[in-house]
Every structure is written in structure tokens, then in C-alpha cells.
Amino acid sequence: MPINVLSEEFASRIAAGEVIERPASVVKELVENSLDASSTRIDVDVLGGGATSIVVVDNGHGISSDELSLAFERFATSKIDESSDLISIDTLGFRGEALPSISSVARVEAVSRYSEMDAGARYVIDFGKPGKVESVGAPQGTRVQVSGLFTNVPARRKFLGSTAKELSRIQSMLSSLALVYPNVAFSLTADGRERLRTLGSGKLVDAISGIYGAEVASHMLELEPDESAAFTVDGLASTPSMNRSNRTYITIAVNGRWIQSRRLSYAIEQAYHGFIPERRFPIAVVRIRTPMDDVDANVHPAKAEVRFLREDLIFSLVQRSIRGLVSDTAPVHELGTGRTGGSSGLLLTSGDLQKTKIGLDGNSVSPVINRGAKRLSNPFVTSNLEPNAFLNESNPSLTPKEALPVLRVIGQTRETYILAEGPTGIYMIDQHAAHERITYERVKEKFVQRASESQPLLEPVTVELSPTVMVIAVTNIGVLNEIGWGIEQFGNESLIIRSVPSALATRVSGDGAGQVLVQILDDLTDGGSGESWQDRMLATIACHSSVRAGQVLSTEECKDLIRQLENARHPNTCPHGRPTIVQIAFGDLEREFKRK
């Protein structure tokens, strides 16, 4: 075929596909225009999942009658001009593509009244064919109705999902914008039924309540920004007990722009590492503020992604901010809250530390936990950690915000759980999860101090690997040996293991050591890297080094395990996020036995 210049109409329909993929794209573009117009209320009404009709009404400053038709011209915009810096953009829309793209694949009616005018204007553009601007009565703001989306592009309409699926996309997108803009009242009505409503109170927790419900809102923790810093993070993040099976409950905004970022989502997930189970995800609304010239918003047709000048700094800031918040508030799990996430904070605060508690031997002890308790020599719990080893080095005398209450061991049940009595209830400790937490913090401390220890195997073990895994193993052999492995390449597809981390020495040998190493390499193959993979590697070593369920423990061994758990930095969960300890409050027992 010879080279031809496409007609403007045909080219517009092709270009529209970059901006308008589906009904949710239309809603996003129209709502972002409303936000740029300083609206405080935005109402969305859809029919047929948006394919039949979409109506967006706002109370913003509106469009003047002499500019209404111009707004539908390609690259017509009031948000930038020829002198603008395309990096430092502080509006949600700026390319002038949204309205013309929508109007090229749908019938669009726009009614708007500019704030300084007495009358409004109406303009209709029918699948790219412009009409006339008419004077009409209208309230301040803009109303845009989009009908028959993609009717003139049957191939694209054919690829739309079901009505329910397209509506779900609209609701998800609108929910995210409502969370980013809690000062705006949003509503969504679909086929006559209200699906979403927020108050627009300006309080993020109210927006959370409107989107996810009051129960979720009650389990959110506030991220407080450093107002004096150039780079800040604020928002809300859920307690570890409030988590979900997918990451769609994570909302991220940069300078007021809702974005999608796999890397920043990963930073948030990693902040919860060890606090929630694997393959579970937090609920979070994370709002990032950066200097405008540090973010390029002009990198994605639908403006869904941005590029950071200092991405590593942003990643670290997000992760550290949330990690610190979660670390300071992780509660002991109460019986029955594992699924619904309603646990209350039973860890000690500075006020609680003034109360007298029951010691391991049943006697009263001093208000402060005895972190210097003598360690018994047990075959399964040995630790060289000094008490409070993980506290802030700048203030070594600092007491942790939270600590386990001192417990009196009652016994062991099912050769898996240690039963103990505390000042407010009965506690059940998972012996494997608890020992896993203790061991993890010990081996991590050794690793951080570059003091990891090795134990030679009686006989070297050879492990065969696939070519892909072998490349990864050789690339990371230095880190593996630093943690205590003694590994050498043995031919093109094998490794030879001569020693293992000392924590593993009493529990695995021979083929077992090879299986643990393969699991660690599989984690790295699955996409892990850097600090996150190292943490998972240490967690895997701790898991295989710890006492198992089904192992009988003496009373003294149970006591020693609990003493060491008291010394852990994060005693409430194992490194994989499972609870180490569950409480049954005395009040609940009394209610069950009808004493209350």
C-alpha cells in the first residue's frame, strides 16, 4: 500500500484509543477536569456500565460560553501555554486531549455556566461533528453527558467487559480519586442505584469510611508528614490485622495526582513484611508531596504513571514512614480477630509499665519487664542477642513503646501451643512462630553486624539447578556466603554446599540443607532483590532453624522461649506475618461462663 495521510476524523478516532480505553477512562478524564475547576462536589451517573450513558456534574468555576466549543478542539487547554515547563505541572489535565478524544467516539453534550456569568451555555458534538453553542439557564459548574460510547468504533466496543465489570472499574477509579481528595464530596449512581458517596469533609478517615466502611476506618493509622521537608508522605495505613487478599486497596497519589506504581506499591507491601501473612496486603492511602520539578507527569497517555527524578529516595521515604508507624502500633491478636481484624492493642505503653504483673514463677515482679532474665541452656533456643539489641542506638536506655506482658507458663497443648497467664487474660503462644521470630532477629542482627556464623557439613552436598536459577545463584553467591553459607560453583549446573548458617546446623544437614538453599534461590528467581530478598532469605533460615509444632517442650523450655520472645523487637508476629501469640481476655471468659 502506498503511504497516505489519514483524514483528521480517522486519525482522531485512533488517537482517542490512547486516552479513552473504556468507560472508566471517560469518567476519570471528566472528573479530573472537575477537580481542576476547583469543584467541591462531583456527582457521576452511569447507565449500562457507562457504555450507554455517563453524566458528570460538578460545581466548579465552569467554562465561559465563548470558550465552550473551543474546549473540544484538539490540544486546546487552559492549563498550560507555550511558555510552560512540561515537567512542573500542577494540574491533573494539561494536554487538551480528553474532551476531543471522548467526543470523537461518542455523542457529548456539555452544559456549563462560568462563575462570573448570569447564564450558561450548551454545546453538543456528535461523534466528532460539532453543533452550535446555545444559551441556557444552568447552575454554576459543568454538566457533561457522554452517550453511545464507541458506537462508531464497533471493534473497540466489542472488547468492553460486561456491564458489571465496567461499572466495577468506574467505582474503583472513582473511589481512588475520592480518597486522594477527601475535601470533595463524590457520589456514584449506576442504573438508578447509589453505589458510592463521600462527605467531602476534608478528613481522610471520613473518605475511608465512605469507601470501605466504618469498620475499616476504625483500623487505620495516621501517617503524619514532616511539614518542613521538601519530600513528605501523609495519609492512612491499616493496622496489620486489617488486610486484604489483593493489592487493589492501596491508593497512591503524588502531588495530588492519583497514580499507579508497582514500585511504590511494593514499598508499601514491604513496610508490612513480617507483620501480615504472605500473599495478604494492607489497606493504605499514601499521599506523596515532592518538589514539582522532581516529577514528570508527561510520560503516560492517560496520565496514570509518573517518572521520579529521585525514585529511590521516594521508595525509601514511603517504606520507612509506614514501617515505623506499623512497628509502633502492632497489637497482640485477640481470639476471633484473625479473619475480621479487630484486635486491640494489648502491648504495654509507658502507662501500663507502672502496673505490677505476674512473673513466670507466679510471683509479683517489678513494673518494668525483666529483660535481663537468666537464660536457660536449652537445645532449641540459644541467643547471643543482648537485651534491647534493636533499640535506637542514639538512646540505648529507651524503653520500647510496646512489650509483651510478663506471663506465667501454665503448660503446653497439642505439643504446639504454650499456654500462659497474663495480667489481663490467657495467652496462647505458637511455639514455632515464636521461636521463628526470635531466631530471625538473631540471625538478622548477626548479618547486619557482618558477624554471621557458619557450621561445616560432615559431608559436602551437591545441588543441581536449572540454568536460570544457576545464573542467579552465581550472581548472589557473595551475599549467600556472607550470611553463613559455604557455597561454590560445581560445574555448569550445580553448586556444592560445604557449610550452612550456624542457626540451621542443629536442624538440617545433607539434603535438607540443599532444600533450604533451593527455596531461597526460588524466592530470588520470583523477582525478589536487595533488602527485601535478604529479609526473606533470613526468614527462611529462621523457619528451618526453629522448633516445630509437635515437639514436646518442658516447662523450663517454655519459660525460656517466652523470655526470649519478650526481648524481640517485634514479638507479635513471625517473620512471615503470622501471629506468635493470641489472647483470650478474662472479660470474655467471664461472659462465656455467664459470670457477667
Image (spheres, rainbow, N blue to C red):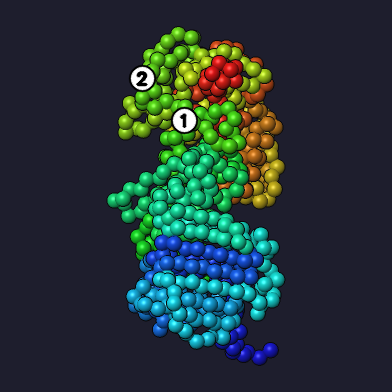
Label 2 crowding class (10 Å Cα cut-off): few <14, some 14-19, many 20+?
Answer: few
Q: Residue at x 37, y 57 (%)?
A: 290
- State the image coordinates of residue 552 (x, y, percent, origin top left): 65, 16
Provide residue 582's location: percent of width, then percent of height: 56, 26
Dot 2 or dot 1, earlier in sequence: 1
Q: Which residue is mark 1?
A: 345
Counting every numbered tag in the picture gives 2
Most extreme residue toward the front is 137
Q: Nearer the viewer, residue 514 or 391?
A: 391
Q: Quadrant of residue 25?
A: bottom right
Dot 1 crowding, Cα within 10 Å, few <14, some 14–19, many 20+: some
Residue drawn 40% across and 50% down? 203
Q: Residue at x 40, y 84 (%)?
A: 66
Q: Is residue 97 visible?
A: no
Q: Which mark is residue 441?
A: none
Which residue is denoted by mark 2 in the rendering? 354
Q: Nearer the viewer, residue 78 or 490?
A: 78
Kind of residue at disc 2: Gln
Tag 1: amino acid = Gly
| 181 vs 407, nearest the viewer | 181
